[in-house]
Image: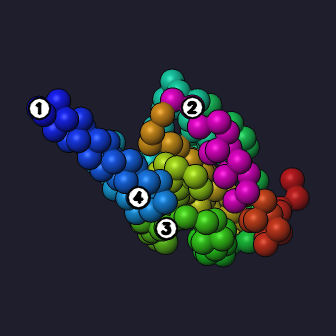
């Protein structure tokens, strides 16, 4: 009799866990809540590109103009656009809005900085993308972009692909300056 109660209670507990796992699997908000409960807020905060030091993990991607990120090795050089910095700022915002599962969490047009939290499609892992738009003079601007994962050691190239998509959108929308 006691064994039967134990088995029934164990079966009910297992069913409850499976139901909870199913809800989490199909409810993005539940996944976001779990990641926040386990790893903290999804926004990793502002970045100072001049003092940025890369982590020892391969789950980040940095696009930076030469000499703007002296303490960090850039993964790609930043293009120079033949537009004023405010135009590039607006275009970065539009490129980010075109990315699914992305929300703007901070913006300072005077400083030329934007920050976004974006999530991976399947598991909704949070990544933070920080951007600084740099004025290079009349009708010339560039940017520094740092996309980094909050969770895990490797991102399987997710941040690199995201940065590539954003840069492709910018190059499609804006003229690139001739060197």
Question: What residue lies at 44% left-to-right and 62% top-to-bottom?
Answer: 27
Q: From where the camera sits, is residue 42 visible?
A: no
Magenta residues span 153-166
Occupied quadrant, residue 136? bottom right
Is label 3 or label 1 in front? 1
Q: Identify whether 147 is placed above or below 118.
A: above
- Mark 1 neighbour class, 10 Å CA radius: few under 14, some 14 to 19, many 20 or more: few
Q: Position of residue 72 (x, y in %)?
A: 56, 32
Q: Earlier in the sequence, mark 4 or mark 2?
A: 4
Task: Tell whether 126 sits left or right of 61.
Answer: left
| Residue found farthest to the right | 178
Of the numbered discs in the image, which one, if any, rests on residue 23? 4
**Element on which disc 1 rests:** helix
For this view, does 145 lie left or right of residue 114? right
Magenta run includes residue 177: no
Residue located beneath label 3 in the image: 103
Mark 2 nearby-residue class (10 Å; few <14, some 14–19, many ≥20): few
């Amino acid at each position: 009799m006691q064994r039967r109660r134990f088995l029934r209670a164990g079966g009910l507990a297992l069913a409850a866990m499976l139901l909870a796992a199913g809800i989490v699997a199909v409810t993005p908000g539940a996944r976001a809540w779990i990641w926040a409960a386990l790893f903290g807020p999804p926004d990793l905060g502002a970045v100072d590109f001049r003092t940025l030091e890369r982590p020892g993990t391969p789950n980040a991607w940095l696009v930076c103009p030469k000499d703007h990120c002296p303490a960090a090795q850039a993964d790609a050089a930043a293009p120079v656009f033949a537009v004023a910095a405010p135009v590039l700022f607006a275009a970065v915002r539009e490129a980010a809005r075109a990315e699914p599962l992305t929300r703007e969490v901070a913006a300072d047009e005077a400083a030329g900085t934007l920050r976004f939290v974006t999530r991976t499609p399947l598991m909704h892992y949070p990544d933070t993308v920080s951007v600084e738009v740099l004025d290079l003079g009349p009708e010339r601007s560039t940017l520094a972009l740092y996309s980094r994962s909050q969770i895990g050691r490797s991102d399987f190239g997710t941040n690199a692909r995201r940065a590539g998509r954003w840069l492709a959108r910018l190059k499609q929308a804006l003229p690139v300056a001739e060197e």
